Image (cartoon, rainbow, N blue to C red):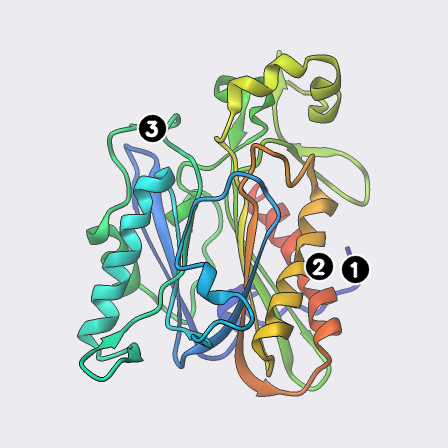
């Protein structure tokens, strides 16, 4: 991670002009959802590195697909059940006449991705369309929330020894200003199998604990591979990266790919067969900057947002 950075005034996703973020959650049930709303339809790319993703409307983000823009992104708990929250976001947008014009109606494009939090609170309470609608309605362009809120309400870190020895994860946000007012920002939902590591010191910041002491998740995997079957499909880190630089769909996809380096810098191990790691990348402006620079900085802000998720 870069040793010198220049965060925006919020050090959050909403430092990108035109973006709003909203959250809704059920605290007793330890689940919730988070919605990212661009003021104007945003060119969007996606990259999935984990092997256990749960998604909605993601295939249309591939380069070459007809749809070029999205109207919102929904991140949610509840595993695949939680994908219902995206319908509530669509309802909210439809009421505002926002969506892809198909002649007889406007269809809001709302890609969504989930984390598994059913084992943390109540497995029978999940984000639904009402919660998605509430999160969209609550969106503000000054959001700086980190920790156990929205989609991060039931997130946990370090489940290699089971949920009972994991610690809370959550949402993290960070931003960086580069060049002449170009902003790159990230919002992450941190719910990995592995531990969170300080890349500078190698210190474990969050993860599995035995007798109150953090354990090396990678070492547990090597020495006790049977532990992996205890946490099958129960992990995922999600991120939304955004910039006010102008990107086409292919460039946005590349930025999402490069941003995954941020996962690898601070999550150990990352991108496992039992994680659904995914990053969306949004272009929300017309600033000029090489997309490779955007991707490099995106990895920095993703890494820093993950650390903030377990620090704030």
Residue 303 versus residue 223 in the image, above or below: below
Residue 137 at what x, y percent from top left?
Answer: 25, 65
Q: Secondary structure at mark 3?
A: loop
Residue 202 versus residue 231 in the image, above or below: below
Mark 2 or mark 1, earlier in chain = 1
Q: Is residue 312 visible?
A: no
Give the camera-side residue of 140 and 63: 63
Q: Horizontally, is 36 left or right of 96 in the view? A: right
> What residue is shown at x 30% (from left), y 56% (from top)?
86
Residue 262 at what x, y percent from top left?
Answer: 69, 52
Q: Is residue 171 visible?
A: yes
Write down the residue under mark 1: 2
Disc number placed over residue 300 in the picture, else none: 2
> What residue is shown at x 74% (from left), y 13% (from top)?
223
Q: Horizontally, is 139 left or right of 146 in the view? A: left
Q: Horizontally, is 24 left or right of 218 in the view? A: left
Write down the residue under mark 3: 121
Q: Horizontally, is 220 left or right of 129 in the view? A: right
């Amino acid at each position: 991670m870069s040793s010198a950075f220049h965060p925006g005034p919020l050090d959050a996703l909403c430092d990108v002009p035109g973006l709003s973020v909203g959250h809704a959650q059920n605290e007793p049930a330890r689940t919730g959802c988070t919605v990212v709303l661009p003021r104007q339809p945003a060119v969007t790319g996606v990259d999935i590195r984990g092997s256990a993703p749960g998604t909605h409307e993601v295939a249309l983000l591939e380069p070459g697909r007809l749809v070029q823009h999205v109207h919102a992104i929904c991140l949610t708990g509840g595993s695949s059940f939680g994908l219902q929250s995206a319908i509530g976001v669509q309802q909210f947008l439809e009421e505002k006449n926002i969506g892809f014009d198909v002649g007889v109606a406007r269809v809001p494009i709302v890609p969504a991705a989930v984390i598994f939090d059913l084992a943390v609170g109540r497995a029978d309470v999940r984000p639904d369309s009402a919660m998605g609608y509430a999160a969209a309605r609550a969106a503000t362009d000054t959001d700086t929330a980190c920790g156990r809120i929205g989609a991060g309400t039931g997130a946990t870190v370090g489940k290699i020894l089971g949920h009972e020895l994991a610690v809370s994860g959550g949402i993290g946000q960070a931003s960086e200003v580069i060049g002449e007012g170009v902003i790159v920002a990230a919002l992450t939902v941190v719910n990995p199998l592995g531990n969170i590591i300080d890349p500078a010191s190698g210190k474990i910041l969050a993860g599995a604990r035995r007798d109150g002491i953090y354990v090396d998740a990678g070492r547990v995997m090597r020495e006790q591979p049977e532990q992996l079957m205890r946490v099958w499909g129960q992990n995922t880190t999600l991120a939304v990266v955004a910039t006010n630089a102008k990107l086409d769909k292919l460039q946005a996809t590349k930025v999402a790919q490069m941003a995954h380096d941020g996962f690898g810098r601070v999550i150990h191990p990352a991108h496992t067969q039992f994680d659904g790691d995914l990053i969306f990348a949004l272009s929300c402006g017309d600033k000029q900057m090489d997309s490779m620079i955007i991707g490099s900085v995106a990895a920095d802000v993703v890494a820093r947002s993950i650390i903030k998720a377990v620090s704030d």
